[in-house]
Image: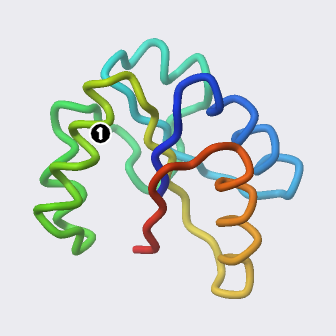
């Protein structure tokens, strides 16, 4: 799960797709804008920004991190979440950081 500036989200999603990462959730305060970036096929499928806190808590995300994510979304950032195998975590994190991720958390 990563938080990125909106301007960087498309680059991150393209890089992830080129590396064969699939089933990615994209969440923003503006659901239509999020759907224009990616299909709703990842681990947070069907969850919008308003219903995100309980979904994140279900994955064991702390209250502080949930609040931080909500704050970032309110400021126009994008949440990207997807499932990968342990061997690919470092590569995924590097791609996200290279694209401007300001917060990354493995869940």
Identify which residue is drawn at 75% across, 57% down.
95
Residue at 76% x, 51% y is 16
Q: Is residue 31 above or below residue 46?
A: above
Say few, some or many: other residues with alpha carbon within 10 Å of mark 1 (under 14 / 14 to 19 / 20 or more).
some
Where's residue 34, x and y in %?
48, 23
Number of callouts: 1
Please name the residue that numbered disc 1 is placed on: 47
Measuring from the top left, give residue 11's x and y in whole percent: 75, 34
69 and 50: which is toward the camera? 69
> Which secondary structure, mark 1?
loop
The chosen color scheme is rainbow
Q: Residue 10 lies in what quarter of the image?
A: top right
Furthest toward the bottom, the residue is 87
Identify the image quadrant of residue 43.
bottom left
Image location (x, y in percent) of residue 7: 62, 23
16 or 99: which is nearer to us? 99
**Left or right: 14 as drawn, with respect to 6:** right
Q: Residue furthest right?
A: 18
- Vertical placement of 22 versus 25: above or below? below
Q: Please, is residue 39 above or below residue 82 in the view?
A: above
Residue at 17% across, 38% down: 51
User: Is 71 situated left or right of 44 in this image?
Assistant: left
Q: Residue at x 46, y 34 (%)?
A: 78
74 on left or right of 57: right
In the figure, residue 84 lies in which quadrant?
A: bottom right
Quadrant where the C terminus sits is bottom left
């Amino acid at each position: 799960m990563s938080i990125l500036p909106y301007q960087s989200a498309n680059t991150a999603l393209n890089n992830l797709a080129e590396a064969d990462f699939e089933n990615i959730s994209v969440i923003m305060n503006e659901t239509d804008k999020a759907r224009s970036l990616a299909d709703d096929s990842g681990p947070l499928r069907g969850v919008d920004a308003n219903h995100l806190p309980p979904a994140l808590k279900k994955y064991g995300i702390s209250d502080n991190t949930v609040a931080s994510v909500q704050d970032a979304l309110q400021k126009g950032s994008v949440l990207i979440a997807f499932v990968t195998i342990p061997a690919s975590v470092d590569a995924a994190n590097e791609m996200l950081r290279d694209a401007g991720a300001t917060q990354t958390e493995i869940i």
